[in-house]
Image: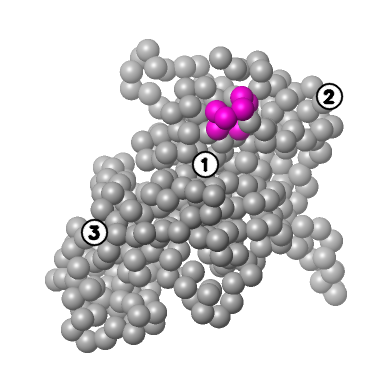
Amino acid sequence: MKENTAKTTNGYLLSVDRLRTYFPVKRGLLRRTVGHIKAVDDISFAIEPGKTLGLVGESGCGKTTAARTIVRLVPATSGKISFEGVDVLAAKGQQLKGLRRDISIIFQDPYGSLNPRMTIGNIVGEAIKVHKGIRGSELIDRIDMLLEKVGLGGSYRNRYPHEFSGGQRQRIGVARALALDPKLVICDEPVSALDVSIQSQILNLLKDLQGEFGLTYLFIAHDLAVVEFFCDEVAVMYLGHIVEKACAEELYRNPLHPYTRTLMSAIPQVELKRRQQRIGLVGEVPSPSNVPAGCPFHPRCSLCDERCMQESPALNEVSKGDGHFVSCWKQDEFSD
């Protein structure tokens, strides 16, 4: 593998602008569209080369859908995705094939994401054969090198997925993601299905690989303790919207959205002086097919007033140039 030298647009490797991904709801004998599930609803963010952006939120908030839209596994409804100046959503033919090489993904499930009928060597080497045309001993050497990089080794090449533990399978998933020397790796909750001790091993492995090869990560998670350790910048999603975004240190020091503060209060703390009272939420997450008017969080917010129920707040920068964005009418009540 070689260290990546990425092109940028305005200093960013990946830029997502007002992305929407809706799924039609069809009913009746003629399967007419009667509504839409708004899985991703007007989100924007950007990632600098060599950095890690964490995308966090409850299950069902649209994190994984956003990631799959970026890699064209799910069609976008509207918006723009730019990677090294290339319009991802408009790319076709060789241009799209090039994007497939430069953007890879590590899936959440280390069991379901590996083909049980293929050997580890074939799983890791398949993309190399398709995209680079490498065969024979050169292919075997490259597979062995990738397995060594993730802490396994060439002796595992002819084994099948069922012979490995969950942590080992996720290492294989990492090796597969690195097979084509990508510039951007999307990590879709890569440690959520693993034991805590194994989580730290995989996170340290990803950190080491990022430093060695200059990788850029989009890291999707719902564990904020993991995100605090791993990410440079964090975007918080709720019901298809980004409600707060800032560098990790600033977000954890000074969360301004009521939803972010609720998530922060749920992080387990070992030190007594760092513990805080758990902030509870009332009600359930609304359906993405019937998003409430106004602020999407207002049905569960204890600070909700008439304006929150009627007007949707934009994602605005708190102070010019500080890089801390929040979408809330009540943000001043939490500001330092």
Q: Quadrant of the N terminus?
A: bottom left
What is the crowding at mark 2: few (fewer than 14 residues within 10 Å), some, or many (at least 20)? few
* In this rendering, position of residue 54 left or right of residue 156: right
Percent across and percent down for residue 235 are: 54, 40
Picture residue at 34% right of the left edge, 66% below the top: 181
Label placed on residue 306: 2
What is the crowding at mark 3: few (fewer than 14 residues within 10 Å), some, or many (at least 20)? many
The vertical placement of 275 against 196, above or below, is above
The residue wearing badge 1 is 56
Which label's residue is closer to the chain start, 3 or 2?
Answer: 3
SS type, badge 3: loop
Percent across and percent down for residue 146 are: 24, 66
Label placed on residue 150: 3
Residue 126 position by quadrant: bottom left
Q: How is the image coloured?
A: one colour
SS type, badge 2: helix
Range of the magenta residues? Answer: 318-325
Which label's residue is closer to the chain start, 2 or 1?
Answer: 1
The vertical placement of 30 against 235, above or below, is below
SS type, badge 1: strand
